[in-house]
Amino acid sequence: MCGIAGIFHIETAKPVDPARIRLMTDAMLHRGPDGNGCWTAPGIGLGHLRLSIIDLAGSAQPMLSEDEADVLTFNGEIYNFKEVRAELSALGHRFRTSGDTEVILAAWRQWGVGCLDRLNGMFAFAIHDQRTQRLFIARDRLGVKPLHYAALPDGSVIFASELKGLLAHPALRRAPDAQAVDDYLAFGYVPDHRCFVAGVHKLPAGHYLMLERGKPIPSPEQYWDVDFSKRARGSAADLEAELMHHMRQAVASRMVADVPLGAFLSGGVDSSTVVALMAERSTQAVKTCSIGFDVAELDESDYARRIAERFATDHRSRTVSPDDIAIIDSVAAQFDEPFADASMLPTFRVCQLARESVTVALSGDGADEAFAGYRRHVFHHGEERVRNLLPQGLRGPVFGALGSLYPKADWAPRPLRAKSTLLSLARSGAEGYTDAVGVTGHALRQSLYSDSQLKALGGYRGEDYMIALMETAPARTGLDAAQYADMKLWLPGDILTKVDRTSMAVSLEAREPLLDYRLIEFAATLPDAMRVRGGHGKWLMKRAMRGTLPDDILYRPKMGFVSPIAQWFRGPLAEQARSIATGSALARIGWFNTARLSEIAEAHISGRSDNARLLWQLWMLDKALDRVF
């Protein structure tokens, strides 16, 4: 686990100043406290920060091939490196180290771009091929590890694990992207097809970029995608057995480390499954950690304790207050771009706790996306059944009229929000689901923007990308399309960004076994009924874990990490809410109708309405403006 950065002169092989590379890596020192390296040659410079996990004494980077023709800087882990190494050894390759880094170099030499099909891991890496004067940059299939890049006026391309690495380069022009602001307000994060800083790109998950001196910068090429258009055949028992095989393989491959290893344990289905499979394989007590809250309705620590006792883990728990306001600034700063998922605060706390005893922690992230575990998947699946019964020409007028008449009840549980359901049924499945996952709707955003911002947007609507993604997804059903969109947008943009930044902030490596690409490919072939049944998601996964995990763990309502932002903005952060419309960077930049922002703040503070999520979004946007611009 590391941080990488680099400069490639794509027009002419001008010298690269090593000090520039070090500026970029120094901005990300938290990603690699165990070592750093810099390598330059005419037209190219590569930097590396190291958090040592495998081959602690060797595998320093940037790493040169034995003939010094190829140079690699690599962030991540290749879980099947021993198998790939054995295959390459049989083909005549010799290895000087015992880690996974040199395996990537040899795989590139043997198979070129095809090496990506052989590697199972989480990674972002760059290889400079000195024979062809090309720079090959790649990102893992699901986007667990990040990579940002940008073209500069001097004819160079720069890249780094985090945006702050690019921002350290003095030639990068800093200007905000108006469309990224709309995307952020729509979803609560800036998705991977956009960046807060205009001209900066994120290499999409499952893509590579081949830069060649003397040629224009090409578009990224996709080497992997998840396909929901095929269906597995077999009985529930057969599919359950296959699922268990994939999960066991995924967990086992992620338990390889030369440093202390453990797991996050919330007491939910996903983390409990990972811990159960770790305990099944480990000869020692698995190290687990969890955080609890001093508010009973938010606290899952008792469930975590029960799982820890069941599998005899070496468990550590810490109770924190949901009112963890003191760390907001430092945690938000890890994200560079605005990021409005308030669960970043407790996620950071559990990473802090884990780092006290381990260097690697396995998490349960990915199961909800793979097996339809979110409540929104269950609701969407039900709505799609209604859509399939009634034509759009009938649904639109009937449900649209009923929805407009029904009273709004955002405070109620989703099943009781008939207005939302009726309005969703009046639209296509893609439009309805996109609205369901959104944070601040298009109409509300329009009312917030200033005239100049509306003009700058020119009719742009952040939701349209996701709608198009669902409509063109390799999918058979609406549930397929919803999960596909979540894997392309929500997973890399929110979930994996949150875990990467909060874990790397404390120099902890987080691994996600339930995002093993073979498991994801298998899950995508499951019939809808194997994912959603009886009003519950993750049906087959829960069936597979029966007997291993108690029923009250498998079927209890999903909780997740929660921060009480509504109370904050009526209490200790009330003045912060007011300042959003007055003295903030957000007020000064001219994007918003400040009178409207004041109305929203005062309505929330007085208790007339709940605008907490919007206020949080605006506050995080304000902080990002201060940091970046």
Image (cartoon, grey):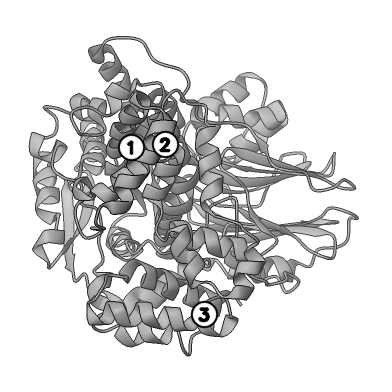
Res 380 label: 1
Query: Disc 2 marks which amino acid?
Result: Gly
Query: Disc 1 marks which amino acid?
Result: His
Q: Is residue 475 above or below residue 338?
A: above
Quadrant of the image occupied by residue 241:
top left
Q: Is residue 574 above or below residue 107?
A: below
Q: What element carries label 3?
A: helix
Of mark 1 and mark 3, the one earlier in the sequence is 1
Residue 117 picture location, percent across and down:
59, 27
Residue 487 appears left or right of 176? left
Confirm whether residue 271 shows in the render.
yes
Q: How far apart are marks 1 and 2 (CA)?
A: 8 Å
Residue underneath mark 3: 586
Res 429 label: 2
Res 542 label: none
Circle 1 or circle 3, nearest the eye? 1
Label 1–label 2 contact, CB within 8 A:
yes
Q: Distance between the residues labelled 1 and 3?
A: 35 Å
Label 1–label 3 contact, CB within 8 A:
no
Residue 435 picture location, percent across and down:
41, 49
Residue 154 picture location, percent across and down:
85, 65
